[in-house]
């Protein structure tokens, strides 16, 4: 019962975040193609953030599937994750409206980094509650993908001040690591 | 369990989209009938989009009802559908505020076309996962209505630059095909 | 299963509507009591609309509780109700920002009237589907309260152009009829 | 069944409130660190309100967990709580944008005070319905934390006109009382 409500609440927040991001795509005043052009970077960051939030929802879905019991720390670790995710629409809007300027690009990466850290804390909190030999601990394993994502975000943030396209490429790369079906990546990481 | 969460999340996103569209109906400053007149096209597009989103929710409801198992590709095909649906409020607002100008009318049709394609991909993904002889495959059948909708949208988009009212009539026609009780249409299509 | 999803979707839409209305309470620029004064009528209409939407949610909750089966017409009758409820934030904002001017007050009543008609249609559709001697048909009975509300709204709309306070008093009276515990009112209506 | 829907609806409203507050973090026009500086107080009040709403969700979750039956008064006591919670985004935005000026700080405390009163009314309504010797009555006990919170808010409101930082410190203190794991505080309060 308790787990269902945790899932339902998280789904509610994520569903709203994903749709609030669309509000940054403001209806233009003109009616020709030129009116749409300034919306292109806003649209592209929307796609990137939609995919990122989709990945979180997907992983959150799998993570909670193995949870048997929910306690206070898990509830708060989950709220902590939702807090960082809730800043994604803001950072998406700032980066998109400023055509990927350095500071907004770095802040975008920072929000993604803290979201990833919050997700790691949630995983650790759940594993702790269920025991190191539980179904979940086995499923999470060494979490190479998670660790690699953290490193890539941490590298991308300072690089935004060198060349913002490197950071953007890293953000897209992290998304692709999670999007592409698991097996090949898993083997690559396993080597 | 998994299917329930997929339904709940989709319902959340669709519920938010349907209400976000109302926000384009901005409170006018005047208090006489003249203040309401410029809102008329916005209101009419709102009605059209409300009905369209309602049809998607309705069909999505029936489609998932026959699903037994959910896997990664189904989750992403569903998110892909939600992505295109999430652009409906933007395109509705642009078309409504510009009194059905050619480009906004074409873009509106484009969003509906890609939503319909995404719905088809979701159906195919689910049928693949359940087998060609499953309950679902039988229920979907040849999907004449779906194919007819795709063709009508594809025709309506270029026609927006000839006469936007033809496109609008086609959008309304597609909605009516899905709204009117099935039997007659089914027979008509079966001939 | 199907009923649960209908409830969940309706709850989602109503939850969003109730919170979207708060957005009309725009953060003022000043920091003294004078900055809050123009918000008073907006706040009062927010309270009235919150109570009205709360009554609909409450009644909807009880109505669906007796439903066994859901079909296409019920789904659409429910969406039709949600459509009219979705216009409440707009009409609330227009009436509140214009300090209860005649036309916005009449439009507010019109949205409430059509919501009440849509609720009646939903009830009739459900009763039809379940049979005139079902649990629900007995529970709904003659629906005196519902009919009285329809009449009061229909009277309040033209009266807004005579004196808007009469209309506002009628809107509040309808809300009180539903809020005050049933027994006394039921007896009063039964006489 | 009924309890589930009450939980789901409340979760929906709370999920939307928590995300609506983010909308006050408006995307700045500049792209340097100076553009972010005026957002700092808005961000800090967002964090405080996020934690407060999170605490309400957490406690609401536990409170309803012990509920067996839901009746009309419980439904309305719950809607009454949601009403006051729905004013948190407005008061958060007003306080944040005005850098903790006296009146906005007092109004923020007022909304928190009325939310706490509404939560107390909900608890009392539920206990009344289940009996003074029920599982819930035992779990709630003397509700020292709840009473202490009410007193601290009531003290903080007038103090905002003396020095707003005292009020802010009190708001943070109440949040910490609920955040820090129960045992120590419970013992402290028990002395």
Image (cartoon, coloured by chain):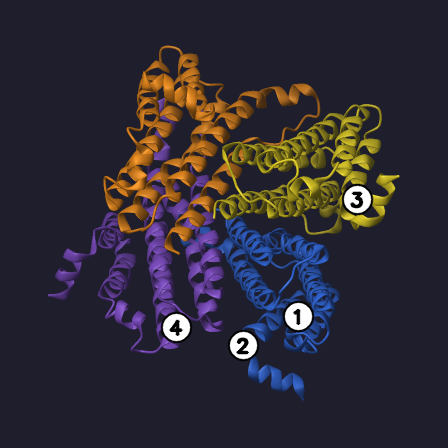
Chain colours: A purple, B orange, C yellow, D blue
Q: Which residue is mark 1?
A: D166
Q: Residue C103: give x, y in percent of width and height.
A: 73, 25
Q: Nearer the viewer, residue A156 or C144?
A: C144
Q: Which residue is mark 4?
A: A125
- What's the chain of the residue with tag 3? C
Identity of the residue drawn at 67% across and 64% down: D119
Give the answer, above or below, for where B127 lies relative to D52. above
Q: Residue D31: give x, y in percent of width and height.
A: 39, 48
Q: CA distance from mark 1 to mark 4?
A: 35 Å
Image side of residue C142 versus residue C130, left or right: right
For marks 1 and 2, the one nearer the N-term is 1
Residue C176, numbered circle = 3
Identity of the residue drawn at 35% across and 72% down: A124
- What's the chain of the residue with tag 2? D
Of badges 2 and 3, nearer the viewer stands: 3
Q: Residue A17: give x, y in percent of width and height.
A: 45, 49
Q: Residues within 10 Å of mark 2 (few under 14, many from 20)?
A: few
Give the answer, above or below, for where D166 lies relative to B42. below
User: Which residue appears farthest toward the left when viewing the image?
Assistant: A191
In the image, are marks 4 and 3 on the same chain? no
Q: CA distance from mark 3 to mark 1?
A: 41 Å
In the image, are marks 2 and 4 on the same chain? no
Identity of the residue drawn at 47% across and 23% down: B180
In the image, are marks 2 and 3 on the same chain? no
Of badges 4 and 3, nearer the viewer stands: 3
Please say if the residues under marks 1 and 2 sit with CB atoms less than 8 Å apart. Answer: no
Of badges 1 and 2, nearer the viewer stands: 2
């Amino acid at each position: 019962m308790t787990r269902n409500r945790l899932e339902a609440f998280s789904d509610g927040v994520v569903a709203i975040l994903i749709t609030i991001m669309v509000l940054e795509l403001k209806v233009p005043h003109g009616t020709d193609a030129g009116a749409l052009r300034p919306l292109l970077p806003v649209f592209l960051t929307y796609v990137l953030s939609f995919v990122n939030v989709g990945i979180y929802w997907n992983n959150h879905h799998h993570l909670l599937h193995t949870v048997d019991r929910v306690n206070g720390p898990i509830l708060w670790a989950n709220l902590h994750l939702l807090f960082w995710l809730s800043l994604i629409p803001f950072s998406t809007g700032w980066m998109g409206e400023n055509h990927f300027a350095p500071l907004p690009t770095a802040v975008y990466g920072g929000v993604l980094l803290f979201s990833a850290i919050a997700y790691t804390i949630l995983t650790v909190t759940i594993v702790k509650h269920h025991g190191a030999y539980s179904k979940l601990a086995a499923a999470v394993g060494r979490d190479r993908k998670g660790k690699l994502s953290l490193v890539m975000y941490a590298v991308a943030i300072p690089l935004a001040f060198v060349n913002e396209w490197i950071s953007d490429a890293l953000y897209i790369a992290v998304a692709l690591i999670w999007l592409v079906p698991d097996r090949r990546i898993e083997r690559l990481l396993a080597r």
